[in-house]
Image (cartoon, rainbow, N blue to C red):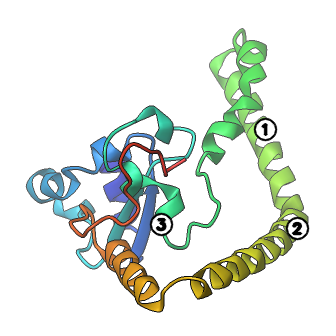
Amino acid sequence: MDFIIGSTVHAIALLIILLSYDIACQWFINVFKRMDEHWPESIKISPTTKLIPAIPKLHEPMHVQANHEVFSLNFIPGVGKSDMETPERVWSAHNALGNSTKTQGPGGRHDVLDDHFGFWNWLKYVGLGKTLMSKYKAAIAERNIQVEGHRGLTESLDPALVANWEQLCVEWEGDAFPKKKFNPYQTEGSCTWI
């Protein structure tokens, strides 16, 4: 995993990278130590690049560990309603290919799989305008509802309490991994990351 991430991220110059990985909580723990000690210079990630680990939403409940809000997509700015499970959903539509191609030789099987995935990608490509526009319109409507709900709730609370809470959230969200700031989203005995 280190080599794959390092090779991919090193090749592109980005300031912030969200890494959605089903075991991000385990992989990310010592990634910077491993990078310093074991990664070749050719794939080391720039120190100016901010890495943000996240666990896809359907994988997260299986982890049941303390302080897992750090990896929750619900609390990462800019993620929106993403669940990061798209790679998992794509495979279900292709499961039937396993049985239909298992008796073919390697070349024929490769061609059939390549044609099938190419057609799948073409369908997605030609439908992008329609699906993205409908998702965009739904996102704008949902954003307006959330903004109004936040405004109404905020106005009903003590302004000093709101300012304090916002400061805690901003500090926690801006903290690099591994986070050391107070986690305002952590609650005892309840699950806030689903």
Q: Is residue 27 above or below residue 103?
A: below
Q: Is residue 87 above or below residue 48?
A: above
Amino acid type, label 3? Ile
187 displayed left or right of 154: left
From the viewer's side, name the closer residue of 69 and 79.
Answer: 69
Q: Report the residue at 18% width, 50% height from top.
A: 30
Q: Amino acid at mark 2?
A: Ser
Residue labelled with disc 3: 76
- The residue at the point 74 percent across, 13 percent down is 99
Closer mark to the observer between disc 1 and disc 3: 3
N-terminal label among 3 and 2? 3
First of labels 1, 3 by sequence position: 3
Residue 177 sits in quarter: bottom left
The residue tagged with tag 3: helix, strand or loop?
A: loop
Q: Circle 1 is placed at which residue position?
A: 115
Q: Is residue 157 above or below residue 32?
A: below
Left or right placement of residue 93 versus residue 131 in this view: left
Q: Position of residue 139 (x, y in %)?
A: 77, 71
Is disc 2 placed on a helix, strand or loop? helix
> Do callouts 3 and 2 mark residues in contact (Cβ within 8 Å)?
no
Q: Is residue 30 left or right of residue 16?
A: left
Q: Residue at x 37, y 84 (%)?
A: 164
Q: CA distance from mark 1 to mark 2?
A: 28 Å
> Label 1 sits on what residue type?
Asp
Residue 39, x across and y down, in percent:
18, 54
Residue 22 in picture, x, y percent from top left:
45, 41
* Residue situated furthest top in the rendering: 103
Q: Nearer the viewer, mark 3 or mark 2?
A: 3
Q: Is residue 1 visible?
A: no
**Whole-Å distance between the Cαs marked 3 and 2?**
24 Å
